[in-house]
Image: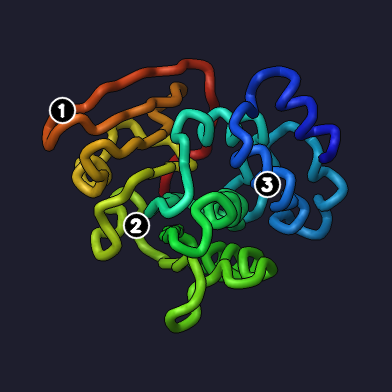
Amino acid sequence: MNNLINNLIEKGYLKTDLIIDAFSEISRVEFLPEDLENEFMADTALPIGHGQTISQPKTVAIMFELLEPDRGHNILDVGSGSGWTTALFCYIVGAKGRVTAVERIEDLIQWGKNNTAKYKNYVKNGEEGIAEFYSVDGKKGFSKNAPYDRILVNAFVKIIPEELKNQLKIGGKMVIPVNDSLVYLEKKGENDFYKEEYPGFSFVPLV
């Protein structure tokens, strides 16, 4: 376990064993441009091209702990970028789970897919594999694989898209940046959502 992960545990950002194991097994270095690989333990967001970033590890830890992903879950990863959060989810949900990664930028979706494929059976190929990658508008989600147990959005919106709320299972959870806050939603009923808001976060906009 590297110093970054130890620090996130000591400061209380990483708490759950399965999430800690995912952070330990899925190295951030595999999801960075070559010229930034030496920065993989920096607790900061880093550029991955096209005006996008790979999120700060502390922020990812907070989002994952709020979401509480688990084995067998069906998860939508919006704005999947270089594939790091997708691969983390693949580790967590395991062979019986499913992860749908959506990204608007075609070059990033292919790069993220290739990065995630470094881990055996993570990318769906025929009947095998966990993650599927689609270059689509993340604000519309991906209805074909809905409903989802968990939805993570990795870029900020001004208003939470209704399509994403509709694609969440009853009992499901979503974490989404809205302006400069991180918003946690839990779907209690068809049109009934429990909401918590955590200010002080910075994300690139969802394109």
The answer to whether mark 2 and mark 1 are in CB contact below 8 A is no
Residue 161 visible from this viewpoint: yes
Q: Of the two numbered discs 2 and 1 on the same chain, state the one appearing first in sequence.
A: 2
Write the residue at 78% across / 25% down.
7
Give the number of the mark in front: 2 or 1. Answer: 1
- The residue under label 3 is 47
Q: Amino acid at mark 3?
A: Pro
Image x and y of residue 92, in percent: 55, 50
Mark 2: few/some/many CA within 10 Å (<14, 14-19, 20+): some
Q: Is residue 197 above or below residue 113?
A: above
Residue 192 badge: 1
Q: Is residue 170 above or below residue 108?
A: above
Mark 1: few/some/many CA within 10 Å (<14, 14-19, 20+): few
Distance from Cα at disc 2 to Cα at disc 1: 25 Å
Write the residue at 74% across / 45% down.
24
- The residue under label 2 is 137
Q: Amino acid at mark 2?
A: Asp
Looking at the image, which is closer to me, 205 or 135? Answer: 135
Image x and y of residue 30, in percent: 74, 58
Looking at the image, which is closer to me, 52 or 199? Answer: 199
Image quadrant assignment for residue 186: top left
Question: The N terminus is located in which quarter?
Answer: top right
